[in-house]
Amino acid sequence: MKNSRKILAAVLTAAMAMGLAACGETAAAPSAASSAAAAPAAATSAAAAPAAATSAAAAASAASGDQKFTVGICQLVQHVALDAATKGFEDSLKAEFGDNITFDLQNAAGDSATCTTICNNFVSEGVDLILANATPALQAAASTTNSIPILGTSITDYGTAMNIDNFSGTVGGNISGTSDLAPLDQQAAMISELFPSAKKVGILYCSAEANSVYQSDVVKKNLEDAGLTVTVYTFADSNDVASVTQTACGENDVLYIPTDNTAASCTEAINNVAQPAGIPIVCGEEGICKGCGVATLSIDYYELGKTTGAMAAKILKGEADISTMPVEYYQNPVKEYNPDIAKALNVTIPDGYKAIDMSAK
Amino acid sequence: MGIASYFASLNPAGLLGRFPAGIAQGIIWGIMALGVYITFRLLDIADLTVDGSFTTGGAVTVMLILAGWNPWLAILAALLAGILAGMVTGILHTALGIPAILAGILTQFALYSINLAIMGMKANQAVSVDKYYLSITSRNVPAAILIGGLTAAVIIGLLYWYFGTEQGSALRATGCNPVMSRAQGININVMKVLGLALSNGLVALAGGLMAQFQGFSDINMGRGSIVIGLAAVIIGEVIGEATLGKHLNFAGRLAFVVLGGVIYYMVVILVLWLKLDSNMLKLFTAIIVAVFLAVPNLKAHARNSFGRAARNAAAGTSDKEAE
């Protein structure tokens, strides 16, 4: 007992000493402003001094070496779409820089507080660029540093995510990125195109997802302008999905599901209710459509990640200033349909729709 | 990846650099753990309201800051909101006779909707340090450690004073022995409501600090916070008792609870730094917490003379193996 007490005390002391040493290290870093190309716009707040100092040191070492770059990737949660975006980003940068780029990929496993821990780690290690995959990751990164360039991806609306009034399309500061927003007006038009006789449309999403609320608002407005009755149904988590879907199916002719992560993980549950009820679902992305939808306007997250990677390459090479880079959108959304469910529900798919490959699930 | 290249890829200096931010975050969770300590240790109730009230604190703070409030006033408002949440649990438990653990779960459940409503029916509200004056932010980690540490010290001081007053002592007595307390004329139902309110107030206050630190409040930010809170309480106690033993007084205990939060975050950072598959993060954390929970128990068991006698009788050996 006495021994173990001593050991514990020693471990504790060591931990505290290391913590103190680490504080000292951060504080002692030179506070000179960075002149390296990789560093973005000047600090806007005096509070940023330590972060700016760390990144300045890192940027300087990157510039003096053989242009080796480290990119920190903070991904909110394990998810097919987010994984694809990360993969596309990595592939694009690997093609550009080869062995001169290393990735530190960290997944917060769904915990928003862990995003902050991860981003703080990136800042303390002075990565050259942070990729924030999903909204809380971007917010955590933005809160952590205003000097290291941050690119977001899989973010639907930067105005909502960053709390910007009258969002102009450029975030400014050290933040830019790509949006996974498929043109919402086209999605709304798709509902009218596929189901001309539908009068009532239900929108289904998880109330915990900021992106979904935004999409729901826009689609609702578009559909109401087209003379349809729209009702919004939200579920709190995967446990309520089945019963909320049941209610929505009972009261509507067609359902719409935006790019909602929780819905994406519950497509089987939704399909098990909607298909027997004979209610077709139009979805915001391919993954959900594959599981429970009839048709979608598809965003390829891998391609979106590659677009983000191209932006990162420009920033790292000093060809572009992140503060003036507008948020980029996915250019070529494809109209797709789910052949299995379309057949089961006897939905006639017009020309111009591509069948989703159901085998690669 | 080979073992050698795996170790080569680890950067010890990087680990040191990561600790300050972990300390800052750990202190905030430590303040939250002080709330958990009040219910879990002093009242002997496992209160699950905290997963909801932590978010409530964050939501209230962010919305008030967005409305132009001073961040410290916003945090005080969060404290009040947390106290209300705790009172709901307390009343469900005492006046309506719902078992404490269920009352907490019910309130936590209800708070999901209430938190959404507080945030204007949005799941996530950002509060940017560039646009608003914040009391604590991950942008400036040394200041965050200082402010968090001072806040924790003030709270520990206040709690130490309060639990020394007649009412505070009555509250502690209620947790120790409700039957005896009632016989002494203590209204134990009032004490339970009071303890739950105080506890959730602190949790919400920590939620308010966390939301500012990370720059947003999110409907899911409180998920699993009871686990972190309990982990901090237990890690703190184990280490406190191991280092100070019988000299560990009440204020010391509270300080070690905050330290427990810091150590918990050190572990998280270590796991991330080791580049262990982050999909396994929750498993590793659960294992570490389970170890801290189990060690005191197993030690007590090993030292228990009855248990040792029983084992000796069964095995017919000396007690050397027991240690």
Image: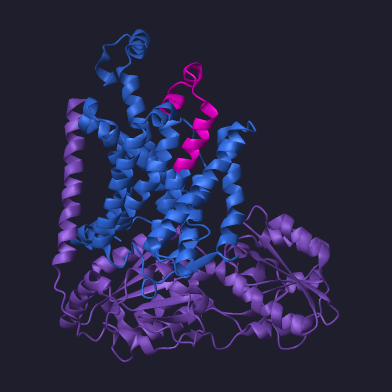
Residue B271, x across and y down, in percent:
32, 53
Pick the front one: A323 or B114: B114
- Left/right placement of residue B317 relative to residue B225 reads left
The residue located at (28%, 46%) in the rendering is B153
**Vertical comparison of A210 with B226: above or below:** below
The residue located at (21%, 71%) in the rendering is A54
Which residues lie in the magenta part?
B172-199
Residue B133, x across and y down, in percent:
36, 69
Residue B173, x across and y down, in percent:
42, 24
Q: Magenta segment: does it hold A29?
A: no
The residue located at (31%, 92%) in the rendering is A319
Which chain corresponds to the colour purple? A
- Left/right placement of residue A217 relative to residue B131 reads right
Which chain corresponds to the colour blue? B
**Vertical comparison of A6 with B110: above or below:** above
Looking at the magenta stretch, what is its main secondary structure?
helix
Q: How is the image coloured?
A: by chain
**Vertical comparison of B86 with B97: above or below:** below
The residue located at (31%, 72%) in the rendering is A145
